[in-house]
Amino acid sequence: LTEAVVGVSYKCPGGGFILITELQEQSKVQASVTTKRGHRALYYEMDLHCLWLGKVTEGEMQGLFRLYNVAHDTKFQLGGDENTSYMYQLGWDQRLSGPWVEQLRTEA
């Protein structure tokens, strides 16, 4: 899983980029396959904790991105219900300020 996540990058439209630098050990992935009446079903659940680095010409910042509630019966939906949608949390150094910080935070 680390190979699939670390190194994922996003190029910001206003310049700069955001890069996933580490998948933290506290991340969890669980999966199981069941067979019922000759049909297989995959059930999975993920809770990923990733460190990220954002750079623009004015500066750089690091943070934590958590993606959770990713499962076989949830989907991506902005503003969706926490019982049926993927959820995320974004953390960064709150002491940083300036327009470039807001730009990176919004893009992340």
Image (tube, grey):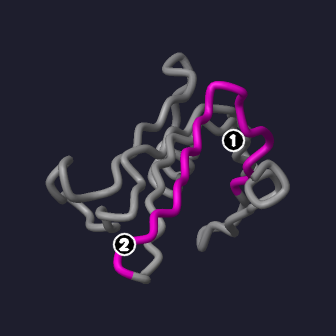
Which numbered marker is on residue 34? none
Give the spatial CA distance, label 1 vs label 2: 41 Å
Residue furthest out toward the front: 37
Q: Which residues are magenta?
A: 18-37
- Using the image, determine if residue 107 lies above or below residue 63: below
Q: What amino acid is labelled 1 in the image?
A: Trp
Q: Residues within 10 Å of mark 1 (few under 14, many from 20)?
A: many
Asked if the stretch drawn in magenta spans residue 34, the answer is yes
What residue would you read off at disc 1? 52
Residue 58 in percent (x, y) is at 72, 45
Q: Residue at x 40, y 57 (%)?
A: 71
- Helix, strand or loop at disc 2? strand
Residue furthest out toward the bottom: 38
Give the mark, 1 or 2, whose residue is nearer the N terminus: 2
Residue 89 in percent (x, y) is at 41, 38
In the image, is 32 to the left or to the right of 85?
A: right
Residue furthest out toward the left: 81
Is residue 21 or residue 56 the one in the foreground? Answer: 21
The chief SS type of the magenta part is: strand
Q: Residues within 10 Å of mark 2 (few under 14, many from 20)?
A: few
Is residue 81 or residue 97 the one in the foreground? Answer: 81
What residue would you read off at disc 2? 36
Q: Residue at x 58, y 44 (%)?
A: 29
- Helix, strand or loop at disc 1? strand
Is residue 14 or residue 67 the one in the foreground? Answer: 67
Residue 42 in percent (x, y) is at 48, 67
Q: Residue at x 14, y 54 (%)?
A: 81
Q: Residue at x 55, y 39 (%)?
A: 65
Labels 1 and 2 touching (C-beta < 8 A):
no
